[in-house]
C-alpha cells in the first residue's frame, strides 16, 4: 500500500515506532514540531526503514499525517 497513516509524537528522545493502532502507526520523532523539522525527521526515518521515498502529503501542521511511500 503506497500510503501510511501516521500519528507523530515530536520532541522524543529518539526517533522510533511506538505502536500500531489499527492502520495508524504512532511514531516518535526526535525533532521539534517547528518549521517542518518533525515532518523532515519523519520522512527521513520512514525512507530509511522502508527503502522507499517517504513524503508527508497531508497533515503538515498537525500530528496526524498521511505519508506517501514510493
Image (cartoon, rainbow, N blue to C red):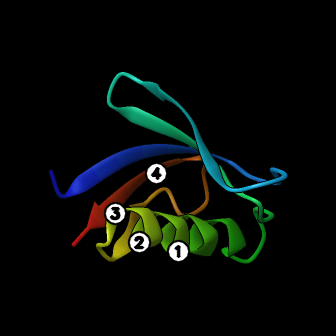
In x, y percent, where is residue 15? Answer: 68, 56
Mark 1 crowdedness (10 Å alpha carbons): few <14, some 14-19, many ≥20: some
Q: Residues within 10 Å of mark 4 (few under 14, many from 20)?
A: many
- Inter-mark Cα distance, 3 to 2: 5 Å
Q: Is residue 30 left or right of residue 4?
A: right
Task: Mark 1 vs mark 4: give the one in front.
Answer: 1
* Residue identifier under label 2: 47
**Residue 5, relative to residue 58: is it above or below?**
above
- Which residue is drawn at the image coordinates 25% and 54% (left, top)? 3
Q: Residue at x 80, y 50 (%)?
A: 12
Q: What element does badge 2 sit on?
A: helix
Q: Which residue is mark 4?
A: 65
Give the number of the mark in front: 3 or 4.
3
For label 4, the SS is strand
Task: Estimate the spatial distance between the alpha carbons at disc 3 and disc 4, rounded to whole Å.
Answer: 17 Å
The numbered mark at residue 44 is 1
Pointer 3 or 4: first along the chain? 3
Dot 3 crowding, Cα within 10 Å, few <14, some 14–19, many 20+:
few
User: Which of disc 1 and disc 3 is earlier in sequence?
Assistant: 1
Query: Could you tell me which residue is drawn at 60 percent across and 51 percent down?
Result: 62
- x and y, in percent, of residue 40 in the image: 59, 75
Q: Provide residue 55's location: percent of width, then percent of height.
A: 38, 72
Could you give the CA–CA distance between mark 1 and mark 2, rounded to whole angstroms? 5 Å
According to the image, label 3 marks what residue?
50
The Cα atoms of the two marked residues, 3 and 1, are separated by 10 Å
Amino acid at each position: 500500500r503506497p500510503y501510511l497513516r501516521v500519528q507523530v509524537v515530536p520532541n522524543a528522545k529518539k526517533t522510533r515506532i511506538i505502536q500500531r493502532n489499527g492502520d495508524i502507526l504512532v511514531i516518535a520523532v526526535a525533532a521539534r514540531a517547528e518549521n517542518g523539522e518533525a515532518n523532515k525527521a519523519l520522512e527521513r526515518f520512514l525512507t530509511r526503514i522502508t527503502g522507499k521515498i517517504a513524503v508527508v502529503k497531508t497533515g503538515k501542521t498537525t500530528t496526524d499525517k498521511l505519508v506517501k511511500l514510493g
